[in-house]
Image: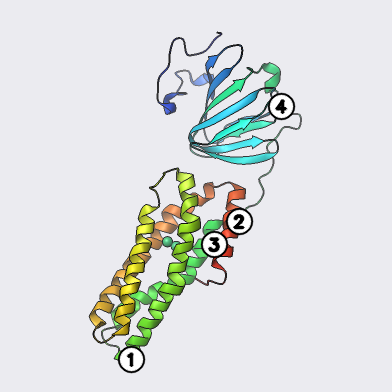
Amino acid sequence: MVESITEHALVTHATALSSSADPASGPVRVLLQNDQVRVLSIDLKPGRELPPHRPEADLVLAILDGMGQLLVDDTIRPLRTGDLAVVRAGVTRGLRCLEGRLLALGVLTPPPGAEDHRTGAGLAWPDEPAADDPAEVIRAEHRGLMAGVADLGRLAGAAGTLDPDRLSLELEATVRFLREGLLPHAAAEERLVYPAVESVLRARGGATNSMVLDHRRIEVLATELAHAAAAPDAGRTDAVHLLQALAAVVSLHFDKEEEDYLPQLSRLGAAERTALVAALRGHHGGLGG
Ligand SMILES: [Fe+2]
Ligand SMILES: [Fe+2]
């Protein structure tokens, strides 16, 4: 056994691994080393990196916290908490943090020497390919849906004074908007967008559940409105309340989506963003809203 910070045993939380007492020690600490293996903790702040290099050492890298990018050969891969990478000896690798913090555990075998850390000489991060923006696809759909959402509130205000035939027509049009515009949009989000947001937040079974509950509530209100529309005179008071509830739930839901969730999509890798945009366009087809 040669030098390492672990003399006897080390038991700690992963996020405490590299909070070194010595700030001059840099982003890498050796936790354990012997003739066969070197185990490192790597703590990168935004803008910091382990530049591309090509050591004759196999690498196993586990992301303990945060997000960043791994260069493997000439491909940039996004990394997030819980990801694991294996890079064989002689393959170019680099690691960088763009925002937040990237905390990783690296296992290298055999322990690399000074030669192995040589950088430069054609070893550089490639330019990231331009990627489409899936958040913009959703925002554009929201813009298309907003007129219909505004109509919910407008009709709630006017329903009390409309003649029964006119009210019936307006309610039918509203139910059509909900069923053919808003709810298909919600379904596509649940299938494509929310899982992508979850993958960024790494919050299994949590981060977007409340958004799905909003969708379910909108679905129930749409069904109740359809019943009220079928009997407009009897259902006039019901219709006003349902329209008011829909207007409130939908506009708050859009606000949460646009301000809280869609920004998470910028943290996807370029290839992930492009694939998501393609899936969204394929799913929605001619859906204007
Ligand atoms: Fe939604
Ligand atoms: Fe939405």
287 or 43, which is in the foreground? Answer: 287
Q: Earlier in the sequence, mark 3 or mark 1?
A: 3
Residue contact at pointers 3 and 4, CB within 8 angstroms: no
Mark linked to residue 90: 4
Q: Nearer the viewer, mark 1 or mark 2?
A: 1
**Separation of marks 3 and 4 at Cα, in angstroms:** 41 Å
Residue contact at pointers 2 and 4, CB within 8 angstroms: no
**Separation of marks 1 and 2 at Cα, in angstroms:** 46 Å
> Does 247 sit above or below residue 227?
above
Residue behind mark 3? 137
Q: Amino acid at mark 4?
A: Gly
Instruction: Please tell me whether mark 3 sits on a helix, a strand or a loop.
Output: helix
Give the residue displayed 54% in from the left and 60% down from the top: 136
Residue 252 visible in the shown view = no
Mark linked to residue 165: 1
> Which quadrant of the picture is home to ligand 2?
bottom left
Q: x%, y% of residue 204?
A: 41, 44
Q: Amino acid at mark 2?
A: Asp
Q: Earlier in the sequence, mark 3 or mark 2?
A: 2
> How did the renderer colour the structure?
rainbow
Q: Amino acid at mark 3?
A: Val
Q: Residues within 10 Å of mark 3 (few under 14, many from 20)?
A: some
Left or right of 171? Residue 40 is: right
Left or right of 265? Residue 253 is: left
Instruction: Please tell me whether mark 2 sits on a helix, a strand or a loop.
Output: loop
Mark linked to residue 46: none
Q: x%, y% of residue 277?
A: 58, 58
Q: x%, y% of residue 142?
A: 47, 66
Residue behind mark 2? 132
**Separation of marks 3 and 2 at Cα, in angstroms:** 9 Å
